[in-house]
Amino acid sequence: MSSDESAARPRRRRNPRGEGARLRDELVEAASDLIAEHGSAEGVSIRAVARRAGVSAPSVYLHFDDRDALISAVLVQRFADLGDAVVEGIEAAGGDASPFSRLVAGCHAYIAYGLGNPGHYRVLFGTPVGPFSPTMSSAAAESLNLLVEGIARCEEAGAAIAGTPLDVATIVWSSLHGQVMLRVVSPSFPWPPVDAMLLPLLRGLVRMPDVTAGG
């Protein structure tokens, strides 16, 4: 390691025994931040991640076999964060809220996560990886599964839905993703409020017997 590189790397306290998991999390966050800053995973190296985390490059290999394993861990974490955000949004609506209101709340939470974390959101859907591992597949499917469950609850409550819950959830997810990406890449466009685009779509696909103007 050159003296210049050593000087560029921030000093970092050694993790106490048994806190290796903390370093792993720090490496995932460092890699995620670098991908978000670069706009893609290309050019994000093990050495760059180690430098950002304040450790030596060999330390990274104590937790990840190679760069691909590290990038996969980043995606798993970011997908989990997105799923957690949707769950929190649904729960914030309250247990007494109608299934439709909870569905709307989950959709709002999805969009809010993407708009509030544009770099991390681009990491999820702009990072090419090989075949998904079972862990990544499960994490990636979480937000879609929450939409499927929400739409199924609406159907159980008497809604007429335009297809199977999975079909409708896929259409809704495509719209949510489109809203996030378009608002991120074209912020100067005079976008209407989120509800002006979201509610007509949901009401057309999930026709509840008594849906008020506010959802």
Image (cartoon, grey):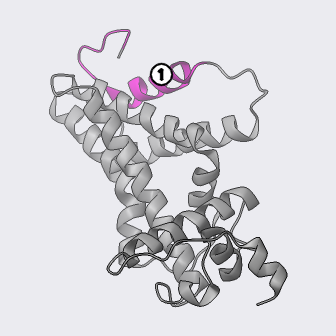
At 67% across and 63% down in the image, what residue appears?
35
Q: Is residue 205 magenta?
A: yes
Q: Is residue 48 visible?
A: yes
Regarding mark 1 in the picture, which secondary structure is present there?
Answer: helix
Q: Is residue 109 left or right of residue 90?
A: right
Q: Nearer the viewer, residue 114 or 45?
A: 45
Q: Which residues are magenta?
A: 193-214
**Residue 138 falls in image quadrant:** bottom left
At 25% across and 34% down in the image, what residue appears?
91
**Residue 106 falls in image quadrant:** top left
Residue that mark 1 sits on? 200
Point out the image quarter for the N terminus.
bottom right
- Residue 48, how many percent across, how many down? 71, 75
Q: Nearer the viewer, residue 150 or 140?
A: 140
Q: Residues within 10 Å of mark 1 (few under 14, many from 20)?
A: few
Q: Is residue 83 left or right of residue 111?
A: left
Point out the image quarter for the C terminus.
top left
**Residue 112 versus residue 208 in the image, above or below:** below
The amino acid marked with disc number 1 is Pro
